Amino acid sequence: MRSLRVLTTFTLFVLASLLVGSSGAQTLTTGDVTGTVTDASGAVVPGAKVTIRFLSTNEVRTENTNANGVYRFSLLQPGEYEIAADHGSLKSSISRFTLLLGQEQPVNLVLQVQRT
C-alpha cells in the first residue's frame, strides 16, 4: 500500500515537472509593434487608423487607436515594416523600421494637416 502511494506521488511529480518545463521552453517567433498617435500639439488621437505593411510580402494590417491614442500589432514576423496613421485630414509620415525576433518595437506617430 505504501509503495503504491510513493509511486503515485512520484508519477504526479514527474508529470508536473514535464508540464512546467515545457511551458518555459516555448520559442519566440514573432514580435509586436505598439505606440501612441498624437496630433501636432501633442494631444492623443483616439480612433486614428494605423496601417502597417510587411515589406517582404506586402501584407497589410490595420488597427484603430483606443481612447488613449494607443495601438498595438501583435504576432508580427520579424523583418522590415512601414507604418503610418491617418484620421480625417490628418496624416502621419511613413515610418520604416526593422522588427526583431521577440521585440516590442515602439513607434509613435504624429499626425499633421495634409495640404491638397
Image (tube, grey):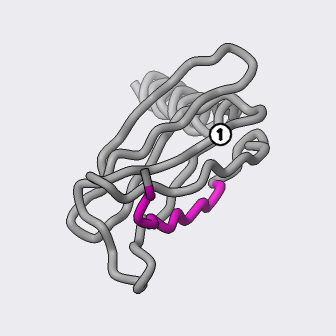
Please identify the residue farthest to the front as the structure is shown.
116
Please identify the residue farthest to the top as the structure is shown.
57
Residue pictured at 53% horizontal, 26% vertical? 15
x and y percent of residue 45 in the render?
30, 67
Q: Secondary structure at mark 1?
A: strand
Looking at the rendering, which quadrant does residue 58 occupy?
top right
x and y percent of residue 33 in the render?
57, 49
x and y percent of residue 17 in the render?
59, 36
Residue sitting nearer the eye, 68 or 115: 115
What amino acid is found at the position of numbered circle 1 in the picture? Answer: Glu
Q: Is residue 44 left or right of residue 97?
A: left
Q: Which residues are magenta?
A: 105-115
Looking at the rendering, which quadrant does residue 19 occupy?
top right
The residue identified by callout 1 is: 82
Task: Judge the density around disc 1: few (<14), some (14-19), many (≥20) Cα neighbours within 10 Å.
Answer: some
Residue pictured at 65% horizontal, 55% vertical? 105
Residue pictured at 37% horizontal, 62% vertical? 70
Residue sitting nearer the eye, 100 or 7: 100
Please tell me how many numbered marks the rendered image carries.
1
Q: Magenta stretch containing residue 112, yes or no? A: yes
Q: Is residue 105 left or right of residue 1?
A: right
x and y percent of residue 111 in the render?
44, 64
Q: Magenta stretch containing residue 107, yes or no? A: yes
Q: Is residue 80 left or right of residue 43?
A: right
What is the chief secondary structure element of the magenta stretch?
strand
Residue pictured at 26% horizontal, 52% vertical? 88
Please identify the residue farthest to the bottom as the structure is shown.
41
